[in-house]
Amino acid sequence: MERVSLFCFAASYALSLGLDCLAMWQKLPLFKKWPQLPGWFRGGAWIMAAAGLVAHSLYLWTWQPSIAWQFGWLLVVAWFLAAFSVYEQAHRGRVSWSIFLLPMVLGMVGMATIIGPPPPEEGGLPNLFSMANLNFWNRLHGVLLLAASVVLSVAFIGSLMFLIRARQLKSKLAPGRGLSLFTLEGLETMNKRLVAVTFPLLSAGLGVGVGIMFAHASELDGFSDPRVLGALGLWLVFGVLLGLRYGTRFRGSVMAWMTVGVWLLFVVCLVLPHTLPTGPKASSRNPGVKAP
């Protein structure tokens, strides 16, 4: 299992996305000669996505990257989104979820590869499945922000779907052409519900995070500290989510664009260094970008 690398599941996800895109390419000459090909491509896409999810799971289980570091956080959020994509592909309806989910998964894996695992001096970071050197509040803070990340990522995808669907209607695209999506009303309702779920998760996560930051105020480098900047950015996200949650003027495309902006800001804030001391330095398993 230690031979599983980031490339293993990233390549599987990329192949799955490619097969899904081919299955949607209705003008492909081969489809006229062999009309059963789209179904085969979709089946192959699900197999590759499932294989990628298995490899992804083995990687997390073997290396156990800490979600207190951007590398682990990105890979764990990507895992949840990939699992959702595999589930939707297995219960394929009329909505093309994987076309939206898998690019986000690949983007997060790519960002994790660029950032890399924690350096040796961060040896005190807890492993993914072992948080013995984290107190209750640190664990609660991480879990709440992780849950908010996953839900807000799905809201981001729902917003993209809304904007694309609105463009399809505006261009009067013929039925059966283009991406299969929910109705505008359904997408708007889904987006509002996801924002409503994200709001309390992020609110609680920020509240706990502020308490932790005050407890370690002496170890921060003033307002220029990346952890402080990241926290300020998250509070800005909180303010926008507050408006989206309770504002009556934000509907339709305006709400969709604001949700897209909130997600982008949220990712930038959480990718900034935001770790806090977790106790005495201890040896930990550092996941490599590639297994030895």
Image (spheres, rainbow, N blue to C red):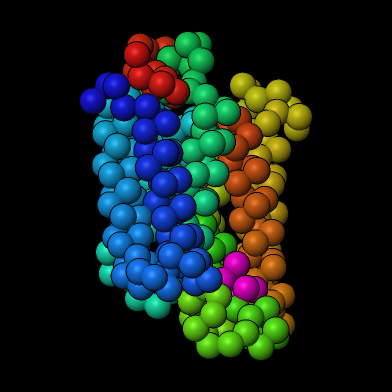
Indicate yes or no whether the magenta region holds residue 161.
yes
Note whether 136 is above or below 26 in the view shown.
Answer: above
Left or right, 13 with reference to 156: left
Task: Give the residue furthest to the left.
Answer: 1
The image quadrant where one finds the N terminus is: top left
Q: Residue at x 61, y 56 (%)?
A: 263
The percent position of residue 124, horizontal first and vertical second, equals: 42, 18
Q: Residue at x 42, y 38 (%)?
A: 11
Left or right, 103 with reference to 252: left
Note whether 186 is above or below 123 in the view shown.
Answer: below
Note whether 191 is above or below 217 in the view shown.
Answer: below
Left or right, 264 with reference to 144: right
In the image, 241 versus 252, the foreground residue is 252
Indicate yes or no whether the magenta region holds residue 120.
no
* Magenta stretch, residue numbers: 160-164
In the image, 272 versus 155, the foreground residue is 155
The percent position of residue 214, horizontal first and vertical second, equals: 59, 35
Does residue 3 appear anywhere in the picture?
yes
The percent position of residue 34, horizontal first and vertical second, equals: 35, 69
The image quadrant where one finds the C terminus is: top left
Does residue 212 appear anywhere in the picture?
no
Q: Residue at x 54, y 36 (%)?
A: 110
Q: Quadrant of residue 162?
A: bottom right
- Magenta stretch, main secondary structure class: helix
Q: Residue at x 68, y 31 (%)?
A: 226
The percent position of residue 199, horizontal first and vertical second, equals: 53, 63
